[in-house]
Image (cartoon, grey):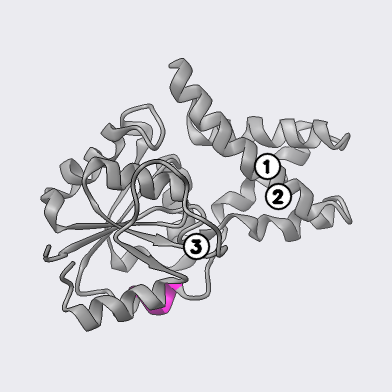
Amino acid sequence: MRAIKTIVFDAYGTLFDVHSVIAAAERLFPGQGRKISEIWRQKQLEYTWLRSLMGRYKDFWKVTDDSLLYTLETLNLPSDEQVRSLLLREYLVLNPFPDVPAAFNQLKDYKLAILSNGTPYMLHSVVSHTGLSPYLSGVISVDQLKIYKPFPGVYQLALTNLNVRKEEVLFVSANSFDAAGGKSFGFTVCWVNRLHTHFDELDVTPDLVVNNLEQLANLLAGSGGRY
């Protein structure tokens, strides 16, 4: 049994809804908003993995722009800098998932932090926009290492930046590849299965599976923070 003292969250898809960009995309390209968002997100993730494997790091803002350019060109839509700028800015003001504010309030006695692929500017912007800043002891970006999740060294950043021990950390992600990366590193891991899908077959399994963060907060309250 581990006594959890620190909870480290992934950002995109876990705390912040990347598909809240659909509304802006729909205004620009009626009838295409959802398709844009889906392709954009998939390519965004693929480019982080490919750049990590090739050793050709570009920060997450550039990756997000490149994946948007690919998306618009694939759909034969205007992809000029002005259009992309309008959509990219949505990443600075993403909506939190509805369960996030109440869960953070319930978990406020823990040390809370974010560990994300996002650049420091992107992360601080969206954290400020969503009002989560007062709860957080750290907002940690892979930009420190210049390689993306699920590289093991990324998870070490949480220990180094927060000055905590691995055994005290609960890592929380809605992205199963990320949850698998955290588990492989040695964290106690909670997978937030927001989409009700199957966990990736990567030879590890999460310690906890919940549908939302309120469920996690209730589980931790019931267990006294021990897992």
Badge 2: residue crowd in 10 Å (few <14, some 14–19, many ≥20): many
Label 1 CA crowd tier, 10 Å (few <14, some 14–19, many 20+): many
Instruction: Calculate the distance from the C-alpha at mark 2 to the C-alpha at mark 3.
Output: 21 Å
Identified by mark 3, the residue type is His
| Mark in the foreground, 2 or 3 | 2
Q: Main secondary structure of the magenta part?
A: helix
Would you say the residues marked 2 and 3 are in contact, meaning their CB atoms lie under 8 Å apart?
no
How many numbered discs? Answer: 3
Name the residue tied to disc 2: 37
| Quadrant, the C terminus | bottom left
Q: Which residue is mark 3?
A: 129
Q: Are marks 2 and 1 in contact (CB under 8 Å)?
A: yes
Q: Which mark is residue 51?
A: none
Is residue 56 in sight in this rendering? no
Measured from the top left, where is residue 34 in percent x and y?
A: 76, 55
Q: Which residues are magenta?
A: 100-104
Q: Is residue 116 above or below residue 142?
A: below
Residue 33, image x, y percentages? 79, 54
Q: Secondary structure at mark 3?
A: helix
Q: Residue at x 65, y 34 (%)?
A: 67
Comes first in the chain, label 3 or label 1: 1
| Residue 23 inside the magenta-drawn segment | no
Dot placed on the residue nearer the N-terminal end, 2 or 3: 2
In the visual, does 21 lie left or right of 205?
right
Disc ID at residue 40:
1
Residues 6 and 60: in front is 6
Taking the spot 45% from the left edge, 42% from the top edge, the residue there is: 118
Instruction: Tell me the element at label 2.
Output: helix
User: Toward the viewer: 121 or 104?
Assistant: 104
Q: Measured from the top left, where is residue 147 in percent x and y?
A: 39, 28
Q: Position of residue 218 (x, y in %)?
A: 32, 81
